[in-house]
């Protein structure tokens, strides 16, 4: 089913899902029925189509499944966020929204439905001075780019929507365009506060783009490829028979994961870095002039971005859809991916419930003076790690020690430099 | 801490031509105050703050007081000499005791504005020393010296006294209304302040509220 | 080391998250309409007038319309008109006793200064009305409630008040008996007919120190 | 296949043209960004995935920000563009440069042999690209690296020097 | 609202704040200053309070507080009602701490009339005042972190503990926040043994809550980064500006009315007064936490040796109270600073002059000095650390 070169590149969706990509042949596809369930389902739907139409149907199905899955995840995430925040604060969280026609109390499950209806019915006010085209385009552009990033994440052994050779680069290319949408939102509202806030949001997004990318380079270097599915494959082996060789369990991998995690927190405007919509400063930042469904679109785009970044963190560092223990691999791979993704999203919400907000200059100082140098040093450590891959038995622990030291040293140094003059204080008492 | 009289002596020594009088406090609180003439108020205050024995570096409270004109009825006991004896003095008659009569004398005391400062010392932990500055009379351009240049604590409180009493403080760096809105004309805390007639009907009018109600409604609403 | 404080913070929030599922100490929400808070006995909201026998709620009011509470009430929200019979003689009963609930701040000064224990504090806080004047102006009929209701709200305080009243009544009866007894012997200087117990001087000295209620 | 190529070309050129004609500077900047995205689509059409995504990442992500910030921070209201008088010399100079550029472009278009079937596209993997870059073209890669670091350092120095004129934090 | 006057050039005699140089540098207004009005409906100004902030880029160049929205001329009301009728109004001054407001007013009137107070009432007053201090400082810590953007977690923990104390007040005085409990010469009701047992149980549990609260906040690097070094207040400026309470002690000045005046029965308890060293927002927060720990000690001692006896002086006259002509200024160490009442009596049942010395109002004097040179986000936290309540500021 080889397709003319350009087409396969332009619409590689079909080739990936068609399991005809060179990669699938290499991997021993564990053929448990559960594992291939999604593919068999898709086969039922598009099996009767002629070949040329099949790849179109496949790609359409992939798109629809992705959007439906992540939209419903978005709805559940808003509820989970408020429930976790509530439980942390010793209160139940939303539990009163009844189902539309029967007043059965559903422990809050109907809350996203209620929010959706509220957002739809809210009046969509556009300030008259605003630049209508841009004001309308900003949320759509933001949402479009966030959804694009979801295409390259491998959700299961064979479930990757777009199996590109340079899929990691595609992920960050699409992610980088969200700044454009933030600028459009800030500029189009024609309001001095939202422009000021858009500038601050851009400063934050740009200064955290660098550590985000730099923390991914070690993974690409060790995995030897930019393709996400290859990276997940590389993390398939086991140490001493049962320890998974996920990258997060190597010194450089842990450092890379932490830098990636902190940078993704900032990139998706989440808790310690949620400066743009800090209510104690410039009200809702660049979202001040949005209401109704456009505001919901911004909200949805933020959650899509968060899911994408968490998905990428799981793929790069937590072994994507690999099972943590060998004998557990009978559970289908997409469930493992979903579990890890939800765990990481839970940590996002947990952090949102616990930490105050950083100021704009502290935020950028953290990026430039702490995360970027740490990521660069981590790159050096990974180079050392890959060069010493073949050290004999006794030298292996030494290799680990050196790598750990290469990271811990600068971490402590930079940490002390960052919190110079800050620290717990002792207080004297009056005579 | 030395008593108010000793402080007054030292101040008189320091500022011979200053008007300083001690005002007794009749109540059981035992807090007499020191009336200071306006011209020397600032320099006296600076002295009180910097004097090593007193060190009154903390001005806790600035209060404006409006003393309206008062008619004081005093009963004076006057001994009236016995009328010249018409008959010759006869020793046997009982001596005529001088008659004591009480007269009601109506004395008019002119009103004035007054600002009271309660001073404490954080360094030596003593106080209060109470300063009073008075205006000559209650005519409107009432002005008193501001002590903000000495104690920064007086800044807001003097602005409040200006806002509610109408006493202009000369030397205050930023004298504006602080509680009322800037366009407000009158001074609410004065005793002769007439409230705006923004009466809102209340179902249980009695006493002062009843008069207002009558002005708005000839007969009080369905007198039950 | 950078980050230990943050981890400690996370540990605290995690403890609360887990705690909220099993430890009542960490789950404090009371879902109001379904679950109502148990009000302590001393809780006070708006006043009400106490009457002694439920069959005649307006006749047996303890209030003698001495208007002490009307003068002492800080926001002046009580309005009393004394009842007069046809000849104009004052009856010891309020013809009109209104309290404007929207002005009253339930500070219980009226209860404190009332020498006859005629007015006590109620405990109902769910008062929503459509009209500010008719709805929130409680007249004598709505204010008057039975002594049993008072016992139900503040048991210890009510018991103490009843004991005090009973003791006062006994003292007055004894005083009347003592006055009637000498009158019986020297019939000539007939004591004037025992008029109704003179109302105690309105300016009773110290407000009767209310007996200590047990919360 | 040429239909895709044609509509891509049309989109890119149209975006660039409208960008010039727009009165609102921000709109024209955004349309410029759209034309860059069009070029990225070209690379994709030509099968060069890596270069397409790099173009998307660099131009649409970063350079667009630089352009937009520049447009914002400089005073660009209508009135302070003092238009020089259109002397004859300027018109002649404008025509000459315009003509030269047109000539070069037209020559390039005519020079290529029309409608030659596109040669088989070598499917390159990123690994081969990397090896090629590090192998024969290492010198050019290093040169680009040096240029970038110099630019970065220049930026830092400028930002730092701007700091001394008005102290950022309290002493 | 007229535009604020030219920046007040303070006479050189007064001590200046570290940020003062900022005002000097920017007196020549070159065009690009941005005037932002924060409030009166800003989500993080504790009540109806407005700050006109002039920004040069991100840094504050001038800050003019504007308030008076809640002004109802409390002092004129005091002159038109009797002494007893003013007591419920003092609950409405600093509506978080009604017990200490009542006590301050009661002390002033007792000083005015020379009224004695029985032992048991003094001890009950100390217990209630220290409970109010716990309540107020817990609230402050919650609000301060809410301003730094903690999405409500510390605030909820603070309010969970505050509710326990309010329940105690409700079961004693009848109302959670409007207690109207003190009278001239003692308290209105005598606390019962069950109530005292409940207080003892709360006091024992409070230490654990404070440890958990500090673990969440005091060591948190982000909190330290946001609050250490912001809103610095020098001791000299604090004394000159009449700042009192935890804010003053955070700058290192040892001045606590419980030790200085020794009013009530405080001299009988041994407790320590924490002092800060830097005078910044973090110190103000930590001083309040340490003061809470001291209050727990005082409560334990007061509960231990609470004597029996009358709760209200038998000779006390609350209704128809006519003090002899004279004047008196009574003050106590409220949770927010020195709250004082200055009363002038002319023998009539209504006071001739009824003046309240509110701590929040005077502590606001140096809000601008502390905010100069900081960013807008810091101005919000600095305002939070001053701990103002608008009912008391506007009166």
Image (cartoon, rainbow, N blue to C red):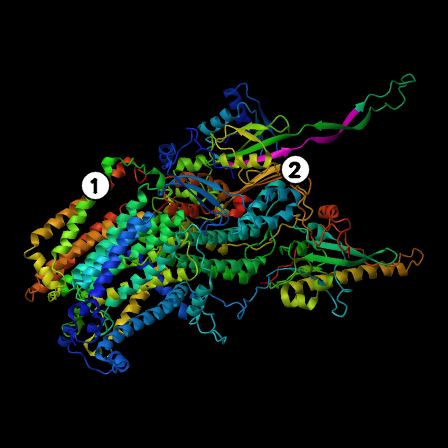
x and y percentages locating residue B166 in the rendered image = 59, 33
Mark 1 crowdedness (10 Å alpha carbons): few <14, some 14-19, many ≥20: few
Residue farthest top in this picture = B88
Q: Is residue E60 above or below residue C46?
A: above
Q: What secondary structure prevails in the magenta region?
A: strand
Would residue A241 be found to the left or right of residue C116 on screen? left
Q: Quadrant of residue E193?
A: bottom right
Disc tally is: 2
Would residue E200 be found to the left or right of residue A298 on screen? right
x and y percentages locating residue A299 in the rendered image = 37, 61
Instruction: Please identify, in this view, whether the residue under mark 1 or under mark 2 is nearer the observer.
Output: 1
**Element on which disc 2 rests:** loop
In the picture, which quadrant includes the N terminus of chain A? Answer: bottom left
State which chain disc 2 sits on: B
Viewer-nearest residue: C139 or A420: C139
Any part of residue B168 in sight: yes
Would residue E116 be found to the left or right of residue D62 on screen? right
- The reply to the same-chain question for discs 1 and 2 is no
From the image, tell me which residue sits under label 2. B193
**Element on which disc 1 rests:** helix
x and y percentages locating residue D171 in the rendered image = 30, 37
Q: Is residue A92 above or below residue A382?
A: below
Please report the bounds of the magenta region as a residue range: B60-78
State which chain disc 1 sits on: D
From the image, tell me which residue sits under label 1. D157
């Amino acid at each position: 089913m080889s397709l003319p070169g350009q087409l396969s590149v332009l619409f590689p969706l079909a080739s990936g899902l068609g399991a005809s990509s060179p990669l699938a042949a290499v991997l021993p596809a564990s053929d448990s029925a559960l594992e291939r369930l999604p593919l068999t389902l898709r086969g039922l739907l598009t099996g009767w189509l002629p070949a040329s139409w099949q790849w179109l149907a496949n790609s359409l199905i992939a798109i629809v499944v992705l959007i439906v899955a992540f939209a419903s995840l978005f709805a559940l995430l808003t509820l989970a966020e408020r429930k976790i925040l509530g439980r942390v604060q010793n209160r139940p969280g939303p539990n009163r929204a009844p189902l539309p026609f029967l007043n059965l109390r559903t422990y809050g499950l109907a809350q996203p439905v209620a929010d959706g209806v509220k957002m739809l019915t809210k009046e969509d006010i556009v300030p008259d001075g605003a630049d209508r085209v841009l004001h309308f385009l900003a949320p759509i552009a933001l949402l479009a780019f966030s959804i694009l990033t979801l295409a390259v994440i491998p959700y299961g052994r064979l479930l990757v929507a777009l199996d590109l050779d340079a899929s990691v680069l595609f992920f960050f290319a699409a992610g980088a365009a969200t700044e454009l949408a933030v600028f459009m939102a800030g500029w189009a509202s024609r309001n001095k506060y939202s422009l000021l806030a858009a500038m601050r949001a851009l400063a934050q997004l740009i200064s955290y783009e660098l550590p985000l990318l730099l923390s991914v380079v070690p993974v690409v270097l060790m995995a030897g490829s930019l393709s996400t599915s290859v990276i997940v494959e590389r993390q398939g082996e086991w140490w001493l028979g049962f320890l998974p060789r996920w990258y997060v369990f190597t010194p450089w991998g842990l450092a890379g994961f932490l830098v990636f995690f902190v940078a993704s927190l900032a990139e998706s405007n989440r808790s310690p870095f949620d400066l743009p919509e800090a209510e104690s400063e410039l009200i809702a930042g660049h979202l001040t002039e949005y209401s109704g469904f456009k505001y919901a679109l911004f909200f949805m785009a933020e959650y899509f971005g968060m899911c994408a970044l968490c998905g990428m963190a799981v793929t790069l560092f937590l072994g994507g859809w690999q099972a943590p223990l060998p004998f557990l691999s009978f559970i289908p791979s997409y469930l493992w991916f979903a579990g890890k993704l939800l765990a990481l999203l839970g940590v996002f919400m947990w952090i949102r419930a616990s930490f105050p907000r950083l100021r704009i200059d502290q935020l950028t100082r953290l990026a430039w003076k702490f995360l970027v140098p740490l990521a660069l040093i981590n790159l050096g450590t990974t180079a050392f790690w890959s060069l010493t891959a073949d050290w004999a038995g006794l030298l292996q622990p030494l290799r680990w020690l050196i790598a750990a030291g290469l990271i811990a040293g600068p971490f402590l140094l930079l940490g002390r430099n960052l919190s110079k003059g800050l620290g717990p204080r002792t207080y004297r008492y009056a005579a | 801490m030395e008593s108010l009289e000793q402080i007054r002596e030292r101040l008189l020594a320091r500022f011979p031509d200053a008007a300083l009088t001690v005002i007794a406090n009749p109540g059981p609180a035992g807090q007499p105050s020191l009336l200071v003439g306006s011209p020397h108020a600032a320099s006296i205050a600076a002295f009180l703050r910097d004097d090593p024995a007193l060190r009154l570096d903390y001005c806790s409270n600035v209060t404006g007081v409006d003393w309206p004109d008062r008619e004081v009825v005093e009963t004076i006991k006057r001994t009236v000499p016995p009328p010249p004896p018409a008959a010759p003095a006869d020793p046997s008659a009982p001596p005529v005791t001088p008659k004591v009569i009480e007269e009601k004398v109506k004395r008019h005391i002119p009103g004035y504005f007054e600002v009271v400062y309660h001073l404490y010392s954080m360094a030596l932990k003593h106080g209060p020393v109470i300063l009073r500055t008075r205006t000559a009379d209650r005519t409107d351009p009432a002005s008193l010296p501001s002590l903000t240049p000495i104690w920064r604590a007086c800044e807001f409180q003097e602005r409040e006294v200006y806002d509610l009493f109408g006493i202009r403080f000369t030397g205050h760096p930023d004298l504006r209304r602080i509680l009322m809105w800037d366009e407000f004309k009158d001074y609410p805390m004065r005793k002769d302040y007439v409230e705006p007639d923004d009466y809102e009907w209340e179902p249980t009018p009695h006493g002062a509220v009843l008069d207002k109600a009558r002005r708005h409604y000839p007969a009080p609403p369905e007198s039950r | 080391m950078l980050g230990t404080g943050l981890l400690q913070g996370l540990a605290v929030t995690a403890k609360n998250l887990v705690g909220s599922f099993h430890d009542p100490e960490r789950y404090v929400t009371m879902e109001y309409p379904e679950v109502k808070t148990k009000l302590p006995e001393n809780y006070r909201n708006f006043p009400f007038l106490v009457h002694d026998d439920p069959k005649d709620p307006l006749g047996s009011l303890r209030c003698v319309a001495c208007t002490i509470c009307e003068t002492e009430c800080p926001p002046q929200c009580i309005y009393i008109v004394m009842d007069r019979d046809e000849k104009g003689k004052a009856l010891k009963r309020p013809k009109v006793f209104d309290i404007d609930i929207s002005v009253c701040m339930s500070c219980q000064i009226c209860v404190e200064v009332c020498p006859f224990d005629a007015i006590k504090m109620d405990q109902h806080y769910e008062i929503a009305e459509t009209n500010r004047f008719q709805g929130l102006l409680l007249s004598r009929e709505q204010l008057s409630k039975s002594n049993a209701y008072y016992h139900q709200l503040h048991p210890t305080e009510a018991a103490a008040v009843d004991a005090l009243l009973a003791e006062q009544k006994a003292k007055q009866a004894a005083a009347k008996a003592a006055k009637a007894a000498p009158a019986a012997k020297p019939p000539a200087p007939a004591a004037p007919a025992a008029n109704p117990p003179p109302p105690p001087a309105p300016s009773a000295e110290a407000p009767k120190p209310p007996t200590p209620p047990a919360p | 296949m040429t239909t895709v190529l044609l509509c891509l070309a049309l989109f890119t050129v149209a975006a660039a043209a409208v960008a010039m004609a727009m009165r609102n500077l921000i709109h024209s900047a955004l349309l410029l960004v759209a034309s860059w995205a069009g070029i990225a689509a070209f690379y994709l059409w030509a099968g060069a995935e890596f270069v397409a995504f790099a173009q998307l990442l660099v131009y649409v992500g970063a350079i667009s920000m630089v352009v937009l910030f520049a447009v914002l921070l400089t005073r660009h209201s209508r009135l302070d563009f003092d238009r020089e008088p259109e002397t004859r010399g300027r018109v002649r100079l404008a025509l000459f440069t315009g003509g030269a550029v047109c000539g070069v472009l037209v020559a390039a278009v005519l020079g290529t042999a029309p409608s030659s079937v596109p040669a088989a596209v070598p499917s390159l993997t990123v690994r081969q690209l990397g090896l090629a870059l590090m192998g024969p073209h290492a010198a050019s890669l290093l040169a680009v690296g040096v240029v970038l670091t110099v630019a970065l350092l220049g930026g830092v120095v400028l930002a730092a020097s701007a700091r001394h004129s008005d102290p950022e934090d309290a002493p | 609202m007229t535009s604020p006057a030219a920046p007040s050039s303070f006479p050189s005699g007064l001590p200046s704040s570290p940020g003062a140089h900022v005002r000097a540098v920017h007196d020549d207004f070159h065009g690009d200053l941005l005037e932002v009005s924060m409030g009166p409906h800003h989500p993080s100004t504790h009540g109806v309070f407005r700050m006109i902030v002039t920004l040069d880029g991100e840094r504050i160049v001038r800050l003019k507080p504007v308030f008076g929205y809640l002004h109802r001329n409390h002092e004129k009301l005091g002159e038109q009602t009797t002494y007893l009728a003013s007591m419920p109004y003092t609950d409405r001054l600093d509506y978080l701490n009604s017990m200490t407001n009542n006590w301050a007013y009661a002390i002033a009137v007792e000083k005015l009339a020379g009224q004695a107070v029985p032992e048991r009432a003094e001890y009950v007053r100390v217990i209630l005042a220290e409970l109010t201090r716990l309540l107020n400082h817990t609230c402050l810590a919650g609000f301060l972190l809410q301003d730094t953007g903690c999405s409500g977690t510390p605030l909820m923990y603070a309010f969970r503990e505050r509710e326990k104390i309010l329940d105690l007040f409700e079961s004693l005085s009848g109302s959670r926040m409007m207690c109207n409990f003190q009278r001239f010469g003692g308290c209105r009701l005598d606390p019962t043994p069950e109530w005292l047992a409940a207080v003892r149980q709360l006091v024992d549990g409070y230490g654990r809550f404070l440890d958990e609260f500090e673990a969440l906040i005091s060591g948190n690097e982000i909190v330290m980064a946001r609050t250490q070094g912001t809103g610095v207040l020098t001791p000299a400026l604090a004394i000159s500006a009449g700042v009192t309470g935890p804010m003053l002690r955070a700058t290192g000045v040892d001045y606590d009315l419980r030790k200085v005046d020794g009013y009530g029965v405080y001299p009988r308890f041994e407790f320590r007064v924490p002092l800060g060293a830097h005078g910044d927002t973090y110190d103000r927060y930590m001083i309040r936490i340490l003061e809470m720990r001291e209050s727990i000690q005082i409560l334990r001692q007061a509960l231990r040796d609470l004597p029996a006896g009358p709760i209200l002086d038998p000779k006390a006259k609350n209704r128809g109270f006519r003090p002899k002509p004279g004047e008196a200024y009574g003050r106590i160490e409220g949770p927010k600073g020195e709250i004082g009442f200055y009363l002038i009596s002319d023998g009539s049942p209504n006071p001739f002059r009824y003046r309240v010395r509110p701590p929040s109002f005077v502590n606001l004097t140096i809000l601008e000095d502390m905010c100069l040179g900081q960013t807008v986000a810091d101005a919000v936290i600095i305002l939070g650390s001053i701990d103002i309540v608008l009912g008391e500021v506007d009166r």
